[in-house]
Structure formats: C-alpha cells, structure tokens
Amino acid sequence: MTDPAASAGDLPEQLAAIVEDFGALTERDRLQLLLDFSRELPELPPHLADHRDQMEPVAECQSPLFLMVEVDATQTVHLYFDAPAEAPTTRGFASILREGLEGLSAPQVLAVPDDVPNRLGLSAAVSPLRLNGMAGMLFRIKRQVREKSAPAAAAS
Amino acid sequence: MSLPLDPDPKLAQYAHPERLVTTAFLAEHLGAAGLVVVESDEDVLLYDTGHIPGSVKVDWHTELNDQVTRDYLDGARFAALMSAKGISRDTTVVIYGDKSNWWAAYALWVFSLFGHPDVRLLDGGRAKWIAEGRPTTTDVPAPSSPAQYPVVERDDAPLRAFKDDVLARIGQTKDGKPLIDVRSPQEYTGERTHMPDYPQEGTLRGGHIPGAQSVPWARAAAEDATFKPRAELEAIYEGEKGLTPADDVIAYCRIGERSSHTWFVLAHLLGYPTVRNYDGSWTEWGNAVRVPIALGEEP
C-alpha cells in the first residue's frame, strides 16, 4: 500500500489534509467520515438557489448533482454544489472537493491531479463505479475554472 | 418461524401477494421474532443517514457481487453474509430501498438465486415509509445471536439468463421467447449508452438486442414508489407489448439491476412462471464480439 502521506505530497495543503485523514482510518471509519462530509455540504447561496438551471449537471454521478464554479477578480476559486439529501455519497464527494479546493487560486485547482478520488481509500467500501462520480466532478470543476479564469484569452 | 402474510387487499390482486408487505403491516410487525428487515440502496451511505429501526444494510455492490469474477456470491459466502446479518433459512426477510425499490428488487432476485424461502419487498420502499412519517433511526442493530445459515448453492438456471441464451433466441422473440429491454428510451435507441444523468459504464456501442421490446422499468412503479395495480401492469406488458403468461421471458438492462424490478413484476405480480433476468445485460452485450445489435425505435 502507498503511504497516504506520500500520496498527498503533491496536493494543496487543505486537500492533502483530507486525503491524510481518510488514509489514517479503517475502512468502516472512512465511510463514517464521508457521511460527516455529506452533512457539512453548505446550502446554496441565494444567488444560486434561485438559478439552479445555470449550474452544470454532473452526468457521472449516480444521483443528480449540480455544480457551479466562480472565479473572482483575484483569481480565487469558489465552489457551489447542489445534491439531494437522499444522495449522501454524492454529497460527501462534493463536500470533500469543496473543502479541499475552496479558496485556492485557479492555477492551484488546475494543478490538482485527476486521481485524487482514488487516494481516499474508498474503492473497496464505496466501489470504483461510485468513485467515477467524484472524478466527473473534479473534471468539470477544472474545466469551468479554465473557462472562467481566462476570459481574455478565450475572447481573443 | 416466519411472519404471517399481509392480508392487505391491495396485495391480494397480485399473483403472489406473499412476496409483498405494506408499510402498515411492516410497522405493526417490526421487532417480531423471525423477521429481519434489509435495506438495499443504490447509495451506499443512505442507510447510515437513517433507516427503519432494526433493519440491516446489504450493499449490492460490495456484498452481493463477487469482487473478482463478474458473478454473485457463492453458497458459502452467501451463508456467511446471511449469518452475519442475523438471517436464518426460515427467517422472513423484508427488503426495501431507494429509487422505487429498484436495488431492493435486485437484492431480492439474488436472494432468490439461493432459493431463500420467504423473502418479500416492502411496497413503496424507503420513500413511502419516510413520506408517511414513520420512524427511522441511525442506530445500527447489534448483531444479536449470529444466525446459522446453511450453505445452499445458487440455482441460476430458473432465474438467470446468460449471453448464449439470449443469442439463441434472436429471431424467435415473436415466437413466445420475448426479450424486454427495461432501459430508458435513449439507451434503447442507441442515442446514449447510460441512463440520463448516470455514469458511463464503458459500453462501446449503443442500441438494443435485436427483437427486444422497450418497456422502461419505471413504468411499473406508481408516483409513491409502490407497484402499479395489476390491471395497469397487464395493460402495459400484455395489452401494449403482447406478452402472455405462457411466454419464456428474458429481461435485461445495463447491469441487471433495473431488470430485476421488471423480473419481480412479471414473476411475482403477474405470476409468469418463466421469467429470467439477463444480468450481463448491455454492459456485456454492447461490448461482446460477434453479437448483433439493433438501433432506433423498432425492435
């Protein structure tokens, strides 16, 4: 097995901390931690709650999930997710990415390796199929960051 | 020791009312000796957010599937799983779950491969129980006295179809050997290879098995996640699609989960004696070498 600390070395600090937390637990406790994350996913802010149609659906998730990335004037990334209470696994994945990526700079988010979902030690307990949903979220987050952080380049 | 049958008149209309219980009946019998309630969901954490008091979780992916071979548990491991869940061979098992009992029906089908004598679905599943304001808890029941489930080998033949069984009936689907494709219309036509809003599951080609008729599984479910009345089910499968109880039916979907729901409807609610689930389904068929597919809306 890979040492969790070693496999988190190339991640932003706040995401590395989450990967290390999961790595330190038994399989059963990892599921409990994922459940805790699902409970901590914040509600949508008012400016998005009324405009869910502007959010991007994540087709790779087993349950309906919508996400929206905002990149502010300082190139700081903000993440918003919407998923129903009946989809705690999906909410947990979203919540991990939110806590792991919120407030980072656009280049930092774009540098996050695509295999992060596989570093949480959840493959056996959650199944690789379900982890596809998290990979789909990360993929779409990075695409939105790319689109929204380089408006000048995109327009030229 | 097993539970009495639910005498509810809604269930009496079906061919095998002994395969269903109502939420009211389950509420009345919770905690009864000889009963184990099983929650089986698509979402692996949903049980942990709150479940019917005393119920145990069985996860379709991590517990019912073999993790190496694409197959189900063998008899020894099923016995170990059942024993750990407090289930004996004479236990009445009531299974419920999310998504109109779609995964619960899948679990029930797997229990049936091992011939578990008394296994029933909760009509309306998790959604109806919660909508009625019935109690839930996050307490996981302590394994009481672990049960001793005997090692019973799976008997796949009556309930399970394989690729070669399906291949052999191409061209005969109008001669009493119908194929029912229960996926979404877009998957059936070949427009897409997975459910709307669901993960891609690695299928090379989209479409359906030649001759298969399209009846999306959810047509059998009512708004409140219960099964539709028998007359409405007959109107769909017999009136519209021309099935008869004499047919030798095979149902399929993508990995065999949605078609378990349809299998339950045909076998237990309409009482068809010969219904099998092709669990290889489109993830096998759509990738297999030298098998034909059909595109578009026609069978």
Image (spheres, coloured by chain):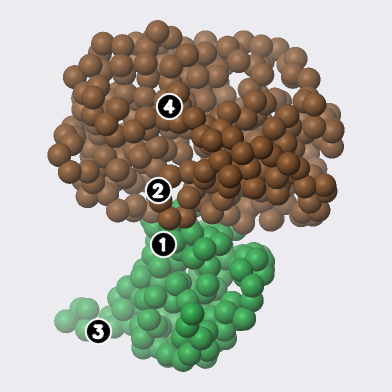
Chain colours: A green, B brown
Tell me whether marks 1 and 2 sit on the same chain. no
| Disc 1: which residue | A132
Quadrant position of residue A152: bottom left
**Spatial CA span between label 1 and label 3:** 32 Å
- The chain under label 4 reads B
Q: Which residue carries the number 2 mark? A: B70
State how far apart marks 1 and 4 are (Cα).
33 Å
Give residue B254's position: percent from left, percent from top: 36, 41
Find disc 3 in the rendering and name its residue: A152
Which amino acid is tagged 3? Ala
Callout 1, which amino acid?
Answer: Asn
Q: Nearer the viewer, residue B117 or B225?
A: B117
Residue drawn at the location 54% of the way across and 35% of the way down: B153
At label 2, the amino acid type is Arg
Q: Is residue A43 left or right of residue B8?
A: left
Q: Secondary structure at mark 2?
A: loop
The reply to whether dot 2 and dot 4 touch (C-beta < 8 Å) is: no
For the C terminus of chain A, the image quarter is: bottom left
